[in-house]
Amino acid sequence: MTSTVPAPLTRTADGSALQAVLLDMDGTLVDTEGFWWDVEVEVFAGLGHTLDDSWRHVVVGGPMTRSAGFLIEATDADITLPELTVLLNQGFEDRIGRSLPLMPGATRLLAELSAQRIPTALVSASHRRIIDRVLDSLGHRHFALTVAGDEVPRTKPHPDPYLFAAAGLGADPARCAVVEDTATGVAAAEAAGCQVVAVPSVAPIPPAPGRTVVGSLEEVDLTFLRGLISFR
């Protein structure tokens, strides 16, 4: 868990019940979920294996250890998990070095949260080396805290990353709004007790109590997020 700037106050200036906003990265702020799958396809092709497209929904949004482990088992590829992790991270870094498209509405939302001094954290299952590269484009200044998948004992779908982020911002998880794009991330945020906005990127996510599903980040602004949190 890395703090990129000093943590701001735990209450918003207008006394809103919303104490913090916690944002996923891949597929939520940056349009990179497809990048990961493309890299996985390329790496396994180099190992002599063709990935079944139906597996994409299995590996999306999860920690690399789970996704890579599943693909090794499914293909019976002759490679270890640490070796595959290195290849996948290298391939992904190469791709984001060439292009890093942001999701529609991401730039506007980050600017609004910063302008209104809302405590904001980036919470990702990606490794620290990947997050730091992406932050060069997203803007380190937008986040009081960043949590990487290789910095917590258990990453998504476990609640640990979101509990770490809320604690790091001095916020009550129940008064944190989380924005996620996958079922894995949604499960992690809900297990932590946060209010969740799901913006599905690859696979559908159904509405549920404590969960709001929208079509894109263009539907999400500070007023919307504040409306999710009720006083307790």
Image: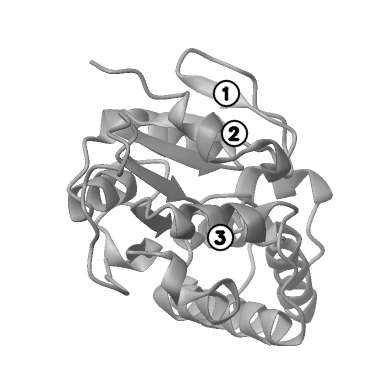
- Viewer can see residue 106: yes
**Residue at image mark 1:** 212
Kindly state the secondary structure of the residue where label 3 is placed: helix
Q: Are marks 1 and 3 in contact (CB under 8 Å)?
A: no
Residue 180 in picture, x, y percent from top left = 55, 42
Kindly state the secondary structure of the residue where label 2 is placed: strand
Which of the 4 image quarters holds residue 102?
bottom right
Q: Residue at x 64, y 69 (%)?
A: 77
Measure the alpha-carbon separation of dots 1 and 2: 6 Å
Kindly state the secondary structure of the residue where label 1 is placed: strand
- 72 and 227: which is toward the camera: 227
Mark 3 Cα-neighbour bin, 10 Å: few <14, some 14–19, many ≥20: some
Q: Earlier in the sequence, mark 1 or mark 3?
A: 3
Q: Earlier in the sequence, mark 2 or mark 3?
A: 3
Q: Earlier in the sequence, mark 1 or mark 2?
A: 2
**Residue at image mark 3:** 111
- 38 and 229: which is toward the camera: 229
Mark 1 Cα-neighbour bin, 10 Å: few <14, some 14–19, many ≥20: some
Q: Residue at x 69, y 58 (%)?
A: 33
Residue 53 in picture, x, y percent from top left = 82, 50
**Residue at image mark 2:** 198
> Total number of numbered labels?
3
Look at the image and tell me in which quarter the C terminus lies. top left
Could you tell me the amino acid type at mark 1?
Thr
Q: Are marks 1 and 2 in contact (CB under 8 Å)?
A: yes
Frontmost of labels 2 and 3 is 3
Residue 200 in picture, x, y percent from top left = 68, 38
On screen, residue 207 above or below 48 = above
Could you tell me the amino acid type at mark 2?
Ala
Residue 229 in picture, x, y percent from top left = 38, 24
Could you tell me the amino acid type at mark 3?
Ala
